[in-house]
Image: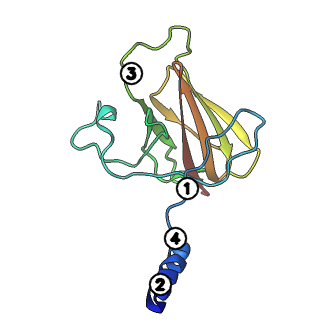
Amino acid sequence: MGARVRVALASVVLLAGCTTGSRPAAAPAGPPGAAAATGCAARVETGALPDWARAGFSGDARMPHVLGAHGDIVAALFAHPLAVERADGSNNKILWVARPVATSPATTAPATLEITATLDGTDTRVTREVAGGPGPSIIDLPRAGCWHLVLRWSGRTDTMDLVYADS
């Protein structure tokens, strides 16, 4: 191998190691008592909601939203950014929309949307419920930071990260 080829190859290897990319997706929050995952995979999209989540919206349904890691639920954020306390008097309104399923859900599974939220890098864990399953909600969390959410409803589970800002 010639000297020029070795220099070029070495440059490519060095540059590849120095580039920055998007942060890897965080691992889903584990069972109660498990250490919290580190990193935040919160990816707020500002384009159109997925086709299956547009019922009740008009036009191209563009709004801030976060899609679950498995693609089974979307959090449509009416308040963006989400905040620990909102000085303007508004709420942290989130519309949870579940992807339709081809078969009917198990009849023994609760209709409630159960949210287990763990603050990134801590053991701080809170639970919230949305009666009746995915739908409109006000979800307030106690501290600013990245929250890893495990979402359970009608026998289904998905995960996502949401960031709450200081007031």
Residue linked to disc 3: 101
Q: In the displayed structure, does residue 54 sit left or right of residue 26?
A: left
Q: Secondary structure at mark 3?
A: loop
Q: Secondary structure at mark 1?
A: loop
Task: Tell me residue 86's x, y (percent).
Answer: 55, 51
Which three-letter amino acid code belongs to the residue tagged 1? Answer: Pro
Which three-letter amino acid code belongs to the residue tagged 4? Answer: Thr
Front of the two marks 3 and 2: 2
Of labels 3 and 2, earlier in sequence is 2
Instruction: State whether residue 12 is above or below residue 39.
Output: below
Of labels 1 and 2, earlier in sequence is 2
Q: CA distance from mark 4 to mark 2?
A: 30 Å
Of labels 1 and 3, earlier in sequence is 1
Of labels 4 and 3, earlier in sequence is 4
Front of the two marks 4 and 2: 2
Task: Tell me residue 22's x, y (percent).
Answer: 50, 62
Which disc, if any, is residue 1? 2
Kindly identify the residue that appears in the image at 39 percent across and 14 percent down.
Answer: 103
Which disc, if any, is residue 24? 1
